[in-house]
Amino acid sequence: MTQSTAPSPRTRIRRKPERARYDVEAINAIVDAAVICTVAFQIDGAVHAIPTIHWRDGEHLYIHGAKASRMLTALTEGEACLTIALADGLVVARSAMHHSMNYRSVVVYGRFELVTEPAEKERSLKALIDSLYPERWDTLRPINDKELNATGVLRIPLAEASAKARDFGVKDDDEDLDWPVWAGVIPLATTLGTPRREDDSVGRTVPATRFRPQSDSDRGAA
Amino acid sequence: MTQSTAPSPRTRIRRKPERARYDVEAINAIVDAAVICTVAFQIDGAVHAIPTIHWRDGEHLYIHGAKASRMLTALTEGEACLTIALADGLVVARSAMHHSMNYRSVVVYGRFELVTEPAEKERSLKALIDSLYPERWDTLRPINDKELNATGVLRIPLAEASAKARDFGVKDDDEDLDWPVWAGVIPLATTLGTPRREDDSVGRTVPATRFRPQSDSDRGAA
């Protein structure tokens, strides 16, 4: 496992540091695999946290929302801590204490900035759509100025971030290895179900997504 | 949609309030469907957030961790904001701005308390194991005092909580309904993959979990 150095004291992972990664590749891969993050911030000294869709473009993580929202205002005025977590597997052991989960997570510290320049804002929204549905943006009814103006887009650098992952089998105590229960890892994955088309959409092709279909029959025209 | 009243001003959902639920049934159902939450808290006035496994027992949400962790200490000393989010579907529209996600989320405010009484702590850890793997606790090598003592268990009342969900189809603008792209909802689900058993575990039965297997062949002896 590649182990680099934490970019700041608050980013350094103290519990089980052998599971930590601080390199850009590891962090970007987890950011890109997830769709929903949780953003924690303060308003008048009180802590708040809200789950929201995120995406990445280069060295920044982006979120968006209605321009008038409390969160977007608070985020431009103070520090935030953003988390991403993916459950990858159930680790099933012979003793309660060695049950665990395989997971990938990222924690990002920093300050969000508002994306104000219209062309840059549009480029970032294109990155959102195309990250979920490759090349879909150019097939859509073009965005208009009113829509662009109503949307707030914020970005935070991925510079002060850490990743943490568990991706191995069961670590039972030696004396428990013959305890008569099943032990192993049961993988968990996010999979696509059967698309449900809108009535007006007969005969058109379901877009590809970055997620894994449950079976081949879930894809294609519907 | 049942709409009750927010239990506190900070719990009241301001953006898209028609998606809000404040009743115990709605909140418990989302808490029980998720495995990982994010807990946001403060240390010396700075905001931190950490993803962690959670479970529910009655009217409390529980988390656990090493007793010596920063998080467990901070959580007993100040207010926390806890979030849960489940991605249920990709909402695919004809214009960028009407793309969305179906989701279920919960936000909980309050203060954690440490579960110190050993019998109560053991009961709560049994609830964790059995919530993931029904009736597994009693089949395991029994927990010992050292393990029980090393584990910190915290709980927070689910009294000050809100739920929010989107669970409907595409809301495109009327003038876009004949735009020539597919529109609809692509469901997302967490599914189980093929279990990978430990070498010593041949012939034993894979435990049932509360998650949905990808196919029937993923279950049974392995």
Image: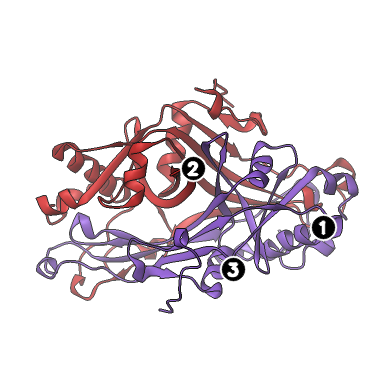
Chain colours: A red, B purple
Badge 1 local density, few (<14 within 10 Å), some, or many (20+)?
some
As shown in the figure, which amino acid type bears the numbered disc 3?
A: Asp
Q: Nearer the viewer, residue A220 or A62?
A: A62
Give x and y (percent) for residue B110. Answer: 58, 55
Q: How far is mark 2 from mark 1, CA to CA? A: 29 Å
Q: Secondary structure at mark 1?
A: helix
* The N terminus of chain A lies in quadrant: top right
Q: Taking the image as drawn, is residue B136 in sight?
A: yes
Please determine whether, in this image, residue A72 is positioned above or below residue A79: below
Give x and y (percent) for residue B165. Answer: 41, 66
Point 22% across, 76% down: residue: A199
Point 42% across, 26% down: residue: A159
Q: Secondary structure at mark 3?
A: helix
Point 32% across, 50% down: residue: A132
Q: Which mark is residue B216?
A: 3
- Mark 1 chain: B
Q: Secondary structure at mark 2?
A: strand
Q: Nearer the viewer, residue A23 or A190?
A: A23
Give x and y (percent) for residue B115. Answer: 76, 54
Q: Are marks 2 and 3 in contact (CB under 8 Å)?
A: no
Q: How far is mark 3 from mark 1, CA to CA? A: 33 Å
Which mark is nearer the camera, 2 or 3?
2
- Mark 3 chain: B
Residue picked out by circle 1: B122
